[in-house]
Amino acid sequence: MALAGACVCAASADAQQTKMLTADKHNEYGIVYSLPLTELKIEVTATRTVQKAGPYWQYAKKYIGTDRVIREDAENWTISSVDVSTYGVADPEQRYLMQLKPGATTSVAVAEDGMLLAINAEAPEMPGRAGAETARKAPKAFSGKEYLQYVSEDFLASQSSAKQAQLLAESLMEVRDAKVSLTRGTAETMPSDGRQLELMLTSLGDQEAALTAAFAGSETVETAVRTFTFRPEKAGKTVLFRLRDFGGFTSANDYSGEPVYIEIADIAEAELPADASGEPKKLPKDAVVYAVPGTANVKVSAGGKRLFAGEFGFAQFGMTFGLAPSLFTSKKEPSYAIFDPATGALREIAEIRNE
């Protein structure tokens, strides 16, 4: 199957910085922050296989004793794995003001885009958005013409493919004989040390591989990783990217590739926090608003095959609630709060203990 391009966007590296805000005269003792929208980071690992036919594959059975050869050039991409995670970005429609009084020492940690991360505490570690496409080191690729480095003058003078194949086979046998002689220590000219022997065997190995590929062909396999981002807004299924055999990843609207889908399903809205008796809490006056995320299932599939499935929290599928501002402004027993950087959920709240 072929791999293709991005549905929403192929992402580049983007790790947000954080900053600490405090209230003072210049901002009229008010701190503005945003709640998050939850986005998905989809990291796709694909395997690319390139096959090159040997120009003398018709003579492989006669000269190298096999007919299991590559007869035509081909390229194939397959998806090896899909990993999905979430991260948050500031929602421009969910901006709030935390109004404080002069002399307040309350601090608010936000992301570079203003997304709320913590109050009276250090910001939690933020997940990276994405990484650019990368290719892992692959075996040496053959162009199909490497054998020309090792041919004789008779080969170059010949106009017959059958004769050329015979001469290549003779060269191949000479190389193999030379390797055996070196290994056994019976070569007419032996290397002076182990390092030189290693270099000579490596060179002969390259020659053998190139001459063999002229008959059998060659295959190179490499791995590429591409990261995409997607912002769910409702339940549904859409093309995330496409994959094609010649070229690999391509865009969702490039119909030369096979589609890879992302599906958002089973959205469950959030419930208001409950008190000790199980009743929904009431919103405090002038509350410090935070996100209570909902959940949804995320699936990635291609060709009827499921590549990934998991459940995640999403700020946009939830609701908002709030905390009493006095929790963070008390001079005797101030509290701190830490929020999830992907969903905005209240992750931790407690009194600050001075040790």
Image (cartoon, rainbow, N blue to C red):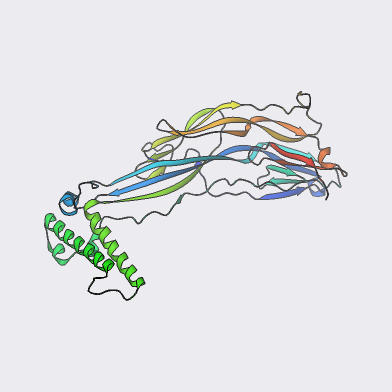
Residue beneath the point at 68% across and 44% down: 114
Tell me if 288 is positioned left or right of 219 in this view: right
Query: Front-most of 70 and 99?
Result: 70
Q: Nearer the viewer, residue 6 or 25?
A: 6
Which residue is located at x 22 percent, y 64 percent? Answer: 175
Is residue 311 visible in the rendered image? The answer is yes
In the image, residue 57 lies at what x, y percent? 20, 50
Q: Is residue 5 visible?
A: no
Residue 304 rendering spot, x and y as whole percentages: 41, 30
- For the N terminus, the image quarter is top left
| Residue under the image location 35 percent in, 42 percent down | 245
Figure check: 296 above or below 353: above
Nearer-the-camera pick, 279 or 341: 279
The outermost residue toward the bottom is 192
**Above-or-below relation of 315 to 195:** above
In the image, residue 137 above or below residue 227: below
